Amino acid sequence: MIKRLIWSAIIFALLITICLLPREHPQISHHQRFTKIAQSGNPLLPWQGPWACVLDNKHKVLWEVKTDNETIHDGYWTYSWFDGQHGKSNFGDCYFEPNRCDTDDLIRHTNKQGLCGQHNWRLPSAEELNSLVQDPSSPSQPFIANDYFLHIKRGDYWSSEHNITLPSQYRHHGKGATAINFHFGKPGILPYRNAAFVMLVADIPTANTHPQLSRRATIKQHQ
Amino acid sequence: MDRQTFIIFHILAIVVVIGSMLTGLRIAIVSQDWLSPVSVLLPQGQMHLWHLGFGVTITLIIACYLWYSFTRPFRSVQSKYHKIINYLGYSSLLLISLSGWMIWANLFTDTARTMHQFAIWMMCFYLFLHSWIYIIQNGRTVLRVLLPKRTSIRHIGLVCSILTASIAGLFLIKSSTQQLTVLTINDATFIDIDGKANEDAWQKATPISVMTIGGANFKQGATEVTIRALANKYESYFLISWLDETKSTNHLPLLKTRSGWQVQENGFYNYDERTFYEDKFAVMLSDGCEAGGDKTLHLGDNPIKNKPKNWHGKGYHASLDGKTRDLWHWKAVRTNDMYLADDNFIGPPAQHLSGQRRYTAGYQPDGKESGAYVMNWQWYTPNGIVPKRLPEHALQTSPSHDSVLPWFGSRPYDASHDRYPIGTLLSSVLYRSNRFEGDRADVRARGEWQNGRWTLELVRKHNTQSQYDVALKTGTCMWVSAFDHAQVAHTRHIQAIKLRYSL
């Protein structure tokens, strides 16, 4: 009987120990393509924030992350397509310019600011922008990874591809530029004067001169 | 009853009681945190149907055993100790069964739930004093007594009969419902969605009452919900009221401390806030009527295969059968001033997004064209936050954290303007624009709290044609849940409420 009592005590103690073992929390999993980058240029873990840019490991570029804080990066601002020579200047809506806004204004201000330590911000190519299109995660979301790209509207985003003949309904406006629509996940050609959204991109040099952006592999998962 | 028949009953009872306890404990953990250490030993997933099935089988075993005992009693040789202890077992089984059926039938549910829990601990005590003592006394020889030596066709027939009757009984009761008759009103009858319910039509509608249990902060975790329904040719109206001693609109207020702004919370980090949260109410609609939320409840910290764990360990809502369940989520701060309930749905488990810390499985909002409330922090951490916006005018002494901060009455946060004294409280909810527009705004709603009771009026088109909504028609089933300043710890009930229209 003593043997049975001892075995009972052992089994009981084992059960108690199993119950009192610390519970595992949900685990962080890294995105295969994107990394959050803080305003300072430092990489962040997937659950950390706030972040100002997203490092795209596929195209080796940094993407501007939109905000809702009424700065130059606010996701509500719209821009007409203009590169200083071609296009239509000041036909979009924003608060940060005395006149209205165009894509050149956002590029100039962002390079001056040095967002995420970069001064080479530009409009993305249609291919780069189109590569962000993916099925939405829920009905209200745009066709993009909305866990990394915040405040993206279900509307048109300008690419750098321009001097393209417009579809027949816009033909009287002459030439236009390619925009990607994140409501439908499809490209389209719009007149330069159209007020569309913008998400800028910056190239990361092959031999990265920005030490913080190459640290992704060294980030350890932590709670 | 011969010894072999008794052994068959005994084995069946062991299996069913253990199954019932394991599934019951999993259900109990949803509302009783102190049980969470045993979570690791319990099954996960859809537990309610299993629990109901075990309940049916226990009842049948009790009935058969009683019939045998009265007609052909089994005479066993037992010590006085075990005879006395057996009475504890019999009484706890009876109490478990009786209280379980009372909860299912919505009869004195709050009292029955307490009885059910008390009976479970009686049963645990009995199992310890009965089984463990037998094992200590007799060791392995217990198995010789426990296991049948020979089984006849009669015994196999008995087991098969009980199991068949259990499955049949489960099928009969799993879709049993309470009926809510929807009173037809003239298209010209005006119902103001103001939470006051002072239209005559409401008095003519027949109310039903459902005792909902298992919620945080309510007295004994329970509150009785009364529901009336009206319908004209186009829309259905619901008047819902429930007892809630406190009006809670103090939703995650932001407190200015020496080290900056801090979110006032007690569980928000694990998405289970139970102190600093608004009151809420949820209505789920489904074409199916299966007891316990029509297969949408998946209990445990990791109940859905290949999906992430949840932070609070309670479970997820999702529909694994691919059907959409509609979910109206009225929120006393975030949606009440929009005169809306948040139109959400429960669908298949969503894709896991690596950049989002919280995973909500099948619980998702309907799509919207515009409009939103947003939280007034740039990034949440439990150690402190920076507000998105501050009021344009200095905070009054009135409790401004109880209301919504309007976008166009505030300005973007600027550290140089943040001269608020330590102890200042600020609202955490910002209305980015007036209200939702689109699919998410299908349900108009307004709640008013008075004298310890919320009164909520809701209205929606019978059929919105949205793939994320369920049409309101005869046979549509409904479940309701109240939240007393709790994020997820809501009350619940077992049987569905089935709508009956006379249109």
Image (cartoon, helix red, strand yellow):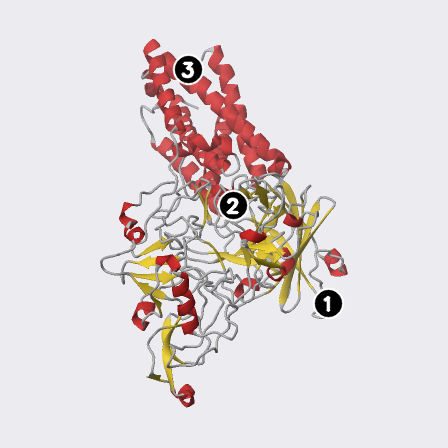
- In primary-sequence order, the first of circles 3 and 1 is 3
- What percent of the width, then of the height, locates residue A102? 44, 75
- Say whether mark 2 and mark 3 are on the same chain: yes
Residue under pointer 3: B133
- In primary-sequence order, the first of circles 3 and 2 is 3
- Report the residue that reaches farthest toward the top: A2
Name above or below for residue B108 compared with residue A205.
above
- In primary-sequence order, the first of circles 1 and 2 is 2
Q: Nearer the viewer, residue B137 or B298?
A: B298
Q: Nearer the viewer, residue A90 or B118?
A: A90
Residue under pointer 1: B189
Look at discs 1 and 2 and give the one toward the viewer: 1
Look at discs 3 and 1 and give the one toward the viewer: 1
| Badge 2 amino acid | Ile
Q: Answer left or right for B286 relative to B19.
A: right
Q: Secondary structure at mark 1?
A: loop
Q: Answer left or right for A29 relative to B198.
A: left
Q: Residues within 10 Å of mark 1 (few under 14, many from 20)?
A: few
| Alpha carbons under labels 3 and 1: distance apart | 70 Å
Q: Nearer the viewer, residue B267 or B312?
A: B267
- Say whether mark 1 and mark 3 are on the same chain: yes
Q: Which mark is residue B173?
A: 2
| Badge 3 amino acid | Ile
- Report the residue that reaches farthest toward the bottom: A172
- What percent of the width, then of the height, locates residue B336? 64, 56
